[in-house]
Image (cartoon, rainbow, N blue to C red):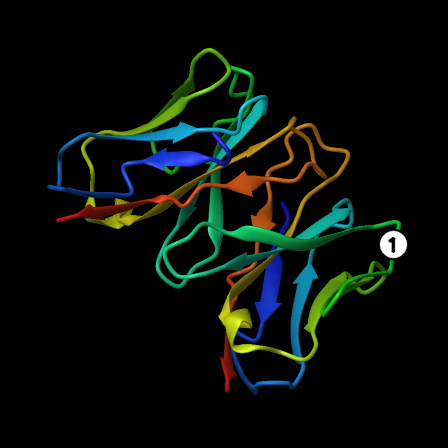
Amino acid sequence: GAGVSQSPSNKVTEKGKDVELRCDPISGHTALYWYRQSLGQGLEFLIYFQGNSAPDKSGLPSDRFSAERTGGSVSTLTIQRTQQEDSAVYLCASSLRSGGGNIQYFGAGTRLSVL
Amino acid sequence: GENVEQHPSTLSVQEGDSAVIKCTYSDSASNYFPWYKQELGKGPQLIIDIRSNVGEKKDQRIAVTLNKTAKHFSLHITETQPEDSAVYFCAASNHGGSQGNLIFGKGTKLSVKP
């Protein structure tokens, strides 16, 4: 596609349920980033992939969060046993390659609401 | 780790006036500084970026300045228009780092009044 695609655009779930958020990066982009944007806050880095590898998972808020990427393309962010504090907009970005200085292109995000 | 502070959090200007948003960073190793514009319901969009070997960069009505000694950089928008109304984020990263994740400021909500 022309840009980074994220689905669903909105997700409402009940506390304790698991959710999966999907990101489809720009074709040919080897690096993929997940960020979280809470109300009135900046973007908080969660995890990045270079190809299918995630060298640094230290940004994930808790062990309830996990992510994977297959085929060097689509990525899934999974949140298990969701809590109300997980409510936020989850943004995905891709760039041609990892490393500082490479422009990151963002998707429109998934707005997660945990009731 | 890197920390980016952004001011002001909100800014209201009259159409045609200039707007300035300022950011400071803490890690002297940071050398790539992009600015993103986020409209309601959309993802952030890159509007301009600057690297540490340059002190100023301009693109039509938008300019960014960088002072590496003081560790601060600013976004300048001249002749503002209502369509400039949005939330603007500054960010920093280490150009030489293999990771490249951006550290963002908390954003500035710009309102341009016609």
Q: Position of residue A99 (x, y in %)?
A: 68, 31
Residue at 41 percent of width and 34 percent of height: A5
Amino acid type, label 1: Val
Residue toward you, A86 or A76: A76
Q: Quadrant of residue B59?
A: bottom right
Residue that sits furthest to the front in the current view: A2
Residue that sits furthest to the top in the current view: A71
Residue at 23 percent of width and 29 percent of height: A80
Horizontal side of residue A93 vs A111, given as left or right: right
Vertical placement of residue B31 versus A78, above or below: below
Q: Position of residue B104 (x, y in %)?
A: 56, 53
Residue toward you, A73 or B60: B60
Residue position for label 1: B54
Q: Quadrant of residue A14?
A: top left
Residue toward you, A100 or A27: A27
Residue at 40 percent of width and 30 percent of height: A23
Residue at 64 percent of width and 85 percent of height: B16
- Circle count: 1
Near mark 1 (Cα within 10 A), the count class, few <14, some 14-19 or many ≥20, is few
Q: Position of residue B112 (x, y in %)?
A: 52, 81
Vertical placement of residue B81 versus B53, above or below: below
Vertical placement of residue A98 versus B88, above or below: above
**Chain to which mark 1 belongs:** B
Q: Position of residue B63 (x, y in %)?
A: 75, 66
Horizontal side of residue A107 vs A81, given as left or right: right
